[in-house]
């Protein structure tokens, strides 16, 4: 009975002052939009740095010891590959090289900046082809593109793209046939193309043309283990038995990417401040609302309304207003996601969105606790001005 009375009182007041409550719901909706958008932006920017490394099919990533886990700074030679393969517990290894290049294609309005990754066909590091096929040989003039590039450009299996690469002081053009399309494999916040390792070494930008006479060098090595549970043991063995290398797991590898940690901490700080603003906005509104209806609450209590009825009615008002705002904000975010250009690095993940929505649903009652506590302390006679 008490709960039904509290519900009636809460909904009746919301309806009578629907304009005021709706404006607060809109403010909460804007906060919801901002929080979910920041969550998607953080995930999108993070994915732009970690997608490729996080999806490697090997469990360990080897860097040059002096490179401080920087892919660009790490330089490893082919001579180390056999030594790595001989370490107990290693099932297979794949060399991976990285370069930033521009690509052109038929119908392009401008060249597209991409990450060009050299991989060994059939070895760890080569991405799966969900359309088309995998790379055929180490010297083939072919490429697998990631889904991000396919979406942005409309390219697909059978199309040709042209890599623009600087060799010495001359810009050279290299035509590559697209033989496969993989899933999202961005690296360094750019879409990726994957080419055979020797093809990569031939066409990657070089300050001096070497005509392939020097030792083949690449950036990192992806290591697949016989038993993934022995990561720490095999990593220690690799460091001990292969000179000049350090082995880490995939998460450590992508978290060490330049700017990744700072980027994520900045986004998380912004989300925290936005939630704090939400608590203050909701709390401030209901505190003002409480001060304006002290007389009404005093009358209710004089007529026999108990403190639990008053508290439940106030809490229901807060929860309802907050729920409406979060619902509007979530719907607005969904609509915004449908019209955002493909180039904006924003990714909505179900778990992240659910966490943001649950957090937003909790800030309403949290922000209104002060006003509920104040209502419980209202004395009927004093509120009606009848106290001596």
Image (cartoon, helix red, strand yellow):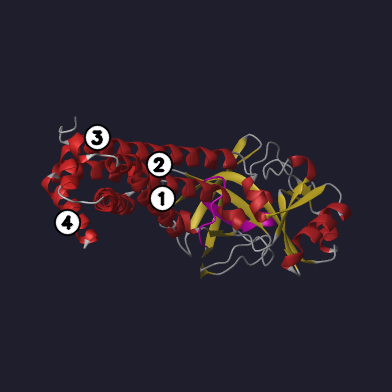
Q: Are marks 2 and 3 in contact (CB under 8 Å)?
A: no
User: Residue 26: x percent and y percent?
Assistant: 24, 43
Magenta residue check for 348? no
How far across and down, in percent of the image, does residue 332 sit? 28, 50
Q: In front here: 148 or 270?
A: 270
At 47% from the left and 60% from the top, the residue drawn is 159
Answer with mark 2 or mark 3, whichever residue precedes in sequence. 2
Tag shown at residue 275: 2
Label 1 vs label 2: CA separation?
8 Å
Q: Which residue is mark 4?
A: 8
Number of labelled discs?
A: 4
Residue 78, placed above or below residue 65: below
Residue lying at 53% horizontally and 47% vertically, measured from the top left:
46
User: Vertically, is 11 above or below 101?
Assistant: below
Q: Quadrant of the N terminus?
A: bottom left
Q: Which residues are magenta?
A: 183-199
Question: Any mark on residue 288, and which?
Answer: 3
């Amino acid at each position: 009975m008490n709960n039904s009375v509290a519900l009636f009182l809460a909904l009746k007041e919301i309806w009578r002052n629907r304009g005021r409550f709706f404006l607060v719901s809109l403010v909460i909706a804007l906060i919801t939009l901002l929080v979910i958008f920041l969550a998607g932006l953080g995930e999108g920017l993070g994915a732009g740095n970690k997608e490729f490394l996080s999806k490697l099919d090997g469990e360990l990533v080897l860097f040059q010891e002096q490179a401080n886990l920087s892919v660009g700074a790490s330089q490893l030679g082919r001579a180390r590959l056999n030594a790595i393969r001989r370490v107990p517990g290693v099932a297979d290894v794949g060399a991976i090289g990285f370069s930033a290049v521009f690509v052109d294609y038929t119908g392009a309005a401008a060249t597209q900046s991409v990450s060009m990754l050299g991989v060994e066909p059939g070895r760890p590091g080569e991405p799966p082809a969900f359309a088309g096929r995998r790379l055929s040989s180490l010297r083939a003039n072919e490429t697998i593109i990631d889904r991000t590039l396919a979406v942005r450009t409309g390219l697909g299996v059978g199309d040709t793209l042209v890599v623009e690469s600087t060799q010495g002081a001359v810009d050279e053009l290299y035509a590559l046939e697209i033989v496969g399309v993989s899933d999202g494999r961005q690296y360094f916040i750019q879409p990726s193309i994957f080419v055979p390792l020797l093809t990569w070494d031939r066409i990657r930008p070089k300050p001096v043309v070497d005509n392939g006479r020097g030792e083949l060098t690449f950036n990192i090595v992806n290591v697949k283990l016989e038993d993934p549970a022995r990561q720490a043991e095999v990593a220690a063995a690799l460091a001990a038995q292969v000179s000049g290398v350090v082995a880490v797991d995939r998460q450590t590898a992508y978290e060490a990417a330049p700017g990744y940690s700072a980027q994520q901490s900045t986004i998380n700080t912004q989300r925290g401040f936005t939630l704090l603003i939400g608590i203050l906005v909701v709390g401030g509104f209901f505190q003002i609302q409480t001060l304006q209806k002290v007389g009404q609450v005093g009358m209710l209590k004089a007529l026999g309304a108990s403190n639990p009825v008053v508290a439940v009615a106030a809490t229901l008002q807060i929860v309802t207003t907050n729920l409406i705002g979060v619902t509007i904000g979530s719907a607005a975010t969904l609509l915004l996601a449908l019209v955002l250009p493909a180039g904006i690095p924003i990714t909505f993940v179900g778990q992240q969105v659910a966490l943001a929505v649950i957090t937003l649903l909790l800030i309403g009652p949290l922000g209104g606790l002060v006003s509920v506590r104040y209502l419980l302390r209202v004395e009927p006679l004093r509120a009606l001005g009848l106290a001596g």
